[in-house]
Image: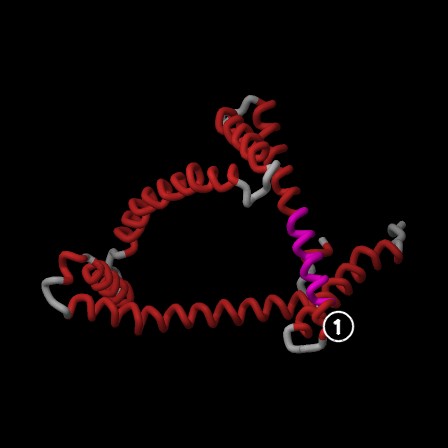
Amino acid sequence: MQPRINLGVLLRRQLVPVAVAMGVGLVVLLGQFSTNEGLSGIVALLIAWGAIVAAFALLLGLANLLLFHTRRIVKRDAQTPFSILILATALIVFLLVLPAGGSGSAAQWILRSVYQPLEASFLALLVFFIGTAMYRALRVRTWEMALFALAAFVVLVGSAPFLQVLSPLIPAARDWVVNVPALAGVRGILLGVALGIIATGLRLLTGIDRPYSE
């Protein structure tokens, strides 16, 4: 026997999420091209609801993180010390920031004295990884790689302060590479990204892609 299909369940799982997503997306999209105060108020309300949903999503992500590391500690995994450090840090920061919020003195002290020094340290280490990646990428095998290596060499040499005093042509060549071919490539990439975002948005609005119903 074939299993019976509950039409009501099917409608709730498929049509309702699609209809809600399409309706909200179309209303917000129309609000960007309209000056109607009533529509602007509806759009503002929908965006506020979206922010609330995003906040709950962050809380769920935090809960998932805590659950994952708690399970690792219970199982006594090899990475247990790091899990304990993560949980202890999260608990301490939460208890310090909770009374006054993100704009309080405790949160600002953590940002300036803990987060920013750690961020600077990671960025300093990133220089060595970038150098290694550049060494691997600048191995000239084709003429395209030769052009890439030449452009990278001109930019690196033109950015060195002690070489800029030798000739004004060095920084001028660096500026030309950055402002003409590199900027043209960046704009082409941004145009491609924008077209991809538009295509993805249209697929979501028309119900072709429905990640919210899975």
User: Percent position (x, y) of residue 26?
Assistant: 70, 71
Left of 91 or right of it: where is 187?
A: left
* Magenta residues, start to end: 42-56
In depth, the one of 90 and 212 nearer the eye is 90
Could you say whether the residue bearing mark 1 is in a helix, strand or loop?
A: helix
Vertical side of 206 occupied by 127: above or below: above
In depth, the one of 39 and 172 nearer the eye is 39
Which of the 4 image quadrants contains residue 154?
A: bottom left
Vertical side of 26 occupied by 113: above or below: above
Q: Residue at x 26, y 69 (%)?
A: 177
* Circle 1 Cα neighbour tier, 10 Å, few/some/many (<14 / 14–19 / ≥20): few
Task: Find disc 1 in the rendering and name its residue.
Answer: 38
Q: Residue at x 60, y 66 (%)?
A: 200
Instruction: Give the main secondary structure, helix, strand or loop, of the magenta stretch.
Output: helix
User: Percent position (x, y) of residue 24?
Assistant: 72, 65
In depth, the one of 206 and 115 nearer the eye is 115
User: Percent position (x, y) of residue 47?
Assistant: 67, 61
